[in-house]
Image (cartoon, rainbow, N blue to C red):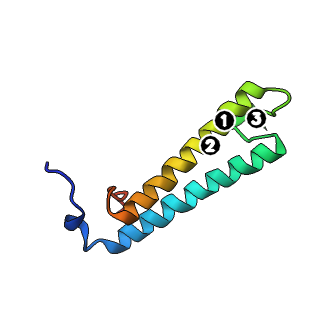
Amino acid sequence: MGRWSAREHLGDEEGKRVTTVFLIVVGVGLLAVAYRAHHVGEIRAGRAGFKPYRPTRAESPGAFYFYLTLYIGAGLALLVWGVLVIAGVARPLPLK
């Protein structure tokens, strides 16, 4: 296995575009959820039995800020990865 080079994958422009759009859309979506949660004071964080688990800033600040940080970190990571794929620095997702 050699080092990855952008020149090796120049023919795979469609896969690169799909990867870039996917990464940027999901990253922006996660940042939008985090932004809304910060303003509303409640964030969706999975399920607790049959009802959704929604920690609030007032009732459970530790869980709220943990999940808010998780959403912001994941959103920024995906957004940066998408931009790096556009720049040719990062490897695109292996979509088939």
Horizontal side, residue 51 vs residue 89: left or right: right
Task: Determine the CA span between mark 3 and mark 1.
Answer: 11 Å
Mark 1 highlights which residue?
Answer: 67
- Which residue does the image show at 62% across and 43% down from the upper left? 71
- Quadrant of res 94: bottom left
The C terminus appears in which quarter of the rendering? bottom left
Secondary structure category for the residue under label 3? loop
Horizontally, residue 26 falls left or right of residue 18, namely right
Q: Earlier in the sequence, mark 3 or mark 2?
A: 3
* Quarter of the figure with residue 81: bottom left
Amino acid type, mark 2: Tyr
Amino acid found under the numbered disc labelled 3: Tyr
Q: CA distance from mark 2 to mark 1?
A: 6 Å
Mark 2, residue position? 71
Name the residue: 49% across, 66% down.
Answer: 21
Cβ atoms under marks 2 and 1 closer than 8 Å: yes
Give neighbour class at mark 3: few <14, some 14-19, many 20+ (Cα, 10 Å).
some
Instruction: Return the x and y of residue 86 as percentages of the image width and height.
Output: 39, 65
In the rendered structure, are the residues bearing label 3 and label 2 in contact, judged by CB atoms less than 8 Å apart? no
Q: Is residue 51 above or below residue 23?
A: above
Q: Where on the picture, by quarter, is residue 11?
A: bottom left
User: Looking at the picture, how far across and down is residue 85, in whole percent?
Assistant: 38, 61
Q: Residues within 10 Å of mark 2 (few under 14, many from 20)?
A: many
| Residue 53: image tag | 3
Residue drawn at 62 percent across, 51 percent down: 30
- Mark 1 lies on a secondary structure that is helix
Q: Are marks 3 and 1 in contact (CB under 8 Å)?
A: no
